[in-house]
Amino acid sequence: MSQDFLDPELFADFIVEAREHLETIEPNLLELERNPGNLSLLNDIFRPMHSLKGASGFLGLNAINGLAHKAENILDELRKGNIAVNPEIMDVILAATDLLRTMIENLEQTGAEGSVDTTQVIARIAAQLEGGTPPAPPIPDMDPGTADFPAEEVAPPAAASAPEPEPAPQPAPPAEELPPFVAEPYHLTSIGEGHMADFLEEAREIIERLNAALVELESPGGGQTDRINDIFRYFHNLKGNSGIIGHKELNGLTHEAETLLNRVRKGEIQTNPAMVDLLLAVVDQVEALVSHIEPATSIATPQDIRPLVARLKKATEEGGVFDTPEATAAPQPAPAPEPAPEPEPAPEAVSDGADSDQDKAASGYDPEDVAIFESTIGQQIEHMHVALSRLAEDPDSKEMIDGLYRALVTIQNSSGYMGLSELKGHAERTAGLVDQARKAGLSFDAMLDILGQECAILVDMIKAALTRLRSGGPAPAEAPAAPLPSATAAAPAPEPKPEPEPAPEPKAEPKPEPTPAPAPQPAPTPPAAAPKPAPAPQPAPKPAPTPPVAPKPATAKPAENGAAAADAGKPKVSATIRVDHEKLDHLMNLIGELIINRNRFAMLARSLEEGKNDVAHIGQQLTETTYAMARISDDLQDTIMKVRMVPVSTVFSRFPRLVRDLSRKSGKEVTLITEGEETELDKSVVEVIGDPLVHLIRNSVDHGIETEAERVAAGKPPVGRVWLRAYHRGNSVAIEIEDDGKGIDPVKMREVAVRKGLMTAEEAKSMDDRDAVDIIFLPGFSSAEKITDISGRGVGMDVVRTNIKNLKGTVNVTSEVGKGTKFTLALPLTLAIIDALMVVVAGQTYALPLDSVSETTKIEVRRMTEVNKRKAVTLRGEVLGIVELAEILDLPPNDANEEIVPVVILQDNDRRLGLIVDRLLERQEIVIKPLGTYLSEFDMRGISGATIMGDGSVVLILDPHEVYMMSTPGGRSK
């Protein structure tokens, strides 16, 4: 059928439904691979594939229809039990879904399926149908040919390494003989900036998950198979997505990683730390490739992936990454246990096929309801068959079309009443297909085959549901599985029409001829893998030089390496945020209330303009409307804040990989323990907090945690621990980085500060231990005896404090010598609006963040005493330091000799300080505005920002932590 004569809405609906079908198929395929005996999963995969085939045939999309038809055939054989589920079949079906997704994307973007070569996948399906398991070996060794959809794109990079099976071993060793790499930027295939932004967003998410999954893969414990499957799926998704946009390097690299992981999944290769290192290097390279894509222009700058591709191919061919001789024996025993578990799940899964909602429906229904349902459905099936047979004679019979539609809607409603949601859904989709066609005025001649198949599946599902309803309990899985194929074969309408479907098949018959070309490849490769154990000792020394290459993907290019290293803490900021639709619904409701209130204000203004005398009544209404507006604006503000909140797990997820790499580099065993990852922070805070956390964790691992020998000598466990935790504390969020290392020695801190000329010996002596530890934040201070390339404790800690201060937060450090150190970051929930206490000093109004105000009080001047040249007062049994805020801010003092002064008591972590002010004003909600860069030449210590008051005046916001530091001896001179 010509696509030019079809309704565009029909195509749009098809694209949406096709995407939903593919999203249903892929996760079910991966689940089926874990549970090969689960027949209900096969039905869940078969039905959407069948619907996709039918809809594409109706629209005349021959390439999609042909590939879906072939995939449906192999799924049907699996359902009948003629073929057993195995990884090779899963791979070929996944490859088919990738191609289908590509063609659907092309259809959406260009209106056509595009020139996608499906012959290789169709040939692989045909080979599986003919021989079952014998053709399995091509999948692990498909690197030269890349049977998946991006074959054409991967061919150029792969061709340089291994075009044929025999010479493949030769190019691998001489890495030096590669020609010089020339990076020529090229355009990627995308429709607008939004499409590319979506790709980049998803790619960064996958990179994060890959890092976390690979680090978990190294950790001991169960679930290794699931982790390997997850990692495989991530690389598979990246490969598919990069193939769609035409990124050759990204596609080629992820394809090789996927090929290696495919053999790991099958048990042919075992994982070891060297393989994890290689895969992490691949992830770093993927991140570099993604970071060199310009979203606005869709231009990609290629990177040299050849060394990594060669290492991946070598690992795939040799059966592992061999950094040590003992690893060579590992891959051999692995394949043996794999076939054994497969038969075991089969008997368990047989009883697992019934649908949960149908089971529920069967358990609590009145027999009379079941009888009525059976009678109604029986009549509708008869009407359906009559309509289909009459339409075969007269495809334009409106009466029969309407009758078929009514029968399907009745089945939909009846099954919905009985709680059979799956049956209802299928009937609803089929009725929708009929309704769209009749509204578009299309002839039903081309649709009879599809409708016959859909109705046959519907009849089959009805029979299975009735069996369960009659028995009053779940039926065995064989009940739904058996009738489906027979119903399709026995349906009266579809039988005359299966001839149009073989239309794609003739294409596949001549084109299997290319497959003999790849087919010989698997044959030599298994023998090649078998003799390799003998020469394995010879290549073993050669991988020894490759470990230096392991860091090389990250350090392959000095210029980019710095960027790659910085990427751990400074990823590209995401421009999007995921929002729960309920929050958006609530926002819409609030906007509605806001409009109603605005109209009330307009009405009241009009009443005043018209000079209505009832001013008291208008005033009362004005007050009520103002209160309503205040409530709505508070709710609106609260909802917007919640929309901007994201969990800190988006930042925390990067650190297991960082600690793992630092642990290896420093030669220490270190475990990272994360807590409170679900704690939410404003997106703008989360985006900036990465750098300070990276620096603090580096310090903890490198200079905080001792070597294994030192820890054992000190009676500590040999494995060091670093805690990264987040939790809510009042109206702020606290993030702690704690280690159980050697701690910070305050005596040493004083000595180093005096030696470096950062303070006088007298100032150092007057400091208590806590203030001495805080010396670590002074610019240029470092107490490390040996500064490594990882970090130097103290170097850059002033930058950490500055970054946190820019976020309107504070950093506090507590340490105990020999026990460990804890840095606590206190961050505001949002950078936009805070509660503040307004105070007056020297005739000027200032704002103090309410989070830092412990209490306000009035103190008699005569009660104050002097301790160490500082004022102090005993308040409720506690000695509290007192200082005049005017003195700290270098403002003129208050000349009035008052006997009682107002005092604001600040809380800086667990330290308190009393500030004497001239007058206390009210608590107020203020909007924070940053200070302009033109003020940078002035001394702005103690000031964190400004706000604009209701009368238009500007009020400065004080920084409580800096105010406290300026109150200490020498604090104002620093």
Image: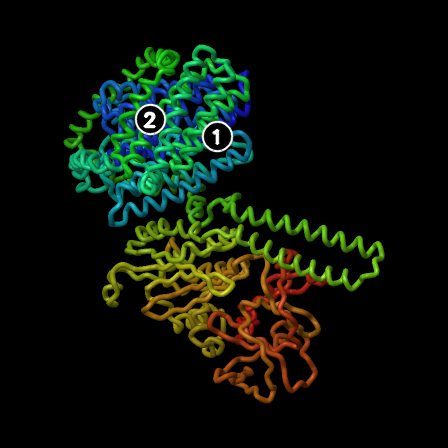
Residue 433 x, y percent position in the rendering: 47, 24
Above or below, 39 relative to 676:
above
Given residues 495 and 637, the one toward you in this image is 495
Residue 969 x, y percent position in the rendering: 53, 76
Above or below, 123 relative to 253:
above
Above or below, 810 relative to 37:
below
Whether residue 924 sits left or right of residue 744 in the image: it is right
Q: Residues within 10 Å of mark 1 (few under 14, many from 20)?
A: few
* Mark 1, secondary structure of its residue: helix
Residue 179 seen by the camera: no
> Which residue is located at x 28 percent, y 54 percent?
667
The amino acid sitting under disc 2 is Asp
Above or below, 662 relative to 825:
above
Q: Earlier in the sequence, mark 1 or mark 2?
A: 1
* Mark 2, secondary structure of its residue: helix
Given residues 722 and 887, the one toward you in this image is 722
Q: Residue furthest right?
A: 611
Dividing the picture into quadrants, the one containing residue 389 is top left
Q: Which mark is residue 16?
A: 1
Residue 824 x, y percent position in the rendering: 44, 64
The amino acid sitting under disc 1 is Val
What residue sits right under mark 2 in the picture?
460
Q: Residues within 10 Å of mark 2 (few under 14, many from 20)?
A: many
Whether residue 495 sits left or right of residue 247 in the image: it is left
Dividing the image into 4 quarters, which one contains the C terminus?
A: bottom right
Given residues 846 and 476, the one toward you in this image is 476
Residue 757 x, y percent position in the rendering: 48, 69
Whether residue 898 sits left or right of residue 261 in the image: it is right
Given residues 951 and 28, the one toward you in this image is 28
C-alpha separation, residue under disc 1 versus residue under disc 2: 26 Å
Q: Residue furthest bottom?
A: 862
Residue 67 seen by the camera: yes
